[in-house]
Image: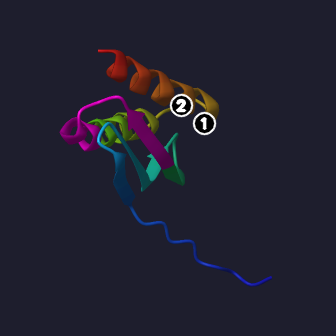
Amino acid sequence: MDAFSLQIEKLNGLSSKSSAASIFSRRITFGEENLGTVVSLVSVRDCEEEDAQVLITDIFEIAGRKLEGTSEGLLAALTAASDASIDYIKS
């Protein structure tokens, strides 16, 4: 079987004045010695144009920090990252 390389680059943009979306990827370490790549699509709407990109970046950073270094299982870590992102948006 041939090996192939997957390269994901950061993509972002405003789809309108009140919504934006970005795709991010980051290599993380979780658990004791597990390495992985997190790929995330973050989309926001109904916010000011200048706030959209900041909000998107903040959400990805919060989720990434929750995943890094976790000692829980992967599903629990993803749930915690999702919950932290939702809490941030609500505040």
| Crowd tier of the residue under label 1, counting other residues whose Cα lies within 10 Å: few below 14, some 14–19, many 20 or above | few
Quadrant of residue 63 in the image? top left
- Viewer-closest of 88 and 29: 88
Q: Position of residue 44 (x, y in %)?
A: 39, 35
Callout 2 amino acid: Ala
Q: Residue at x 40, y 41 (%)?
A: 64
Q: Which residues are magenta?
A: 40-54
Q: Are marks 1 and 2 in contact (CB under 8 Å)?
A: yes
Q: Which residue is mark 1?
A: 74
Callout 1 amino acid: Leu
Query: In the image, is residue 81 above or below residue 12?
Result: above
Quadrant of residue 85 in the image? top left
Q: Residue at x 50, y 50 (%)?
A: 38
Q: Is residue 7 left or right of residue 21?
A: right
Colour mapping used in the image: rainbow
Q: Residue at x 29, y 30 (%)?
A: 47
Q: Residue furthest left?
A: 50
Quarter occupied by the C terminus = top left
- Viewer-closest of 71 and 37: 37
Query: In the image, is residue 55 above or below residue 89?
Result: below
Q: Is residue 22 left or right of residue 55?
A: right
Q: Which residue is mark 2?
A: 77
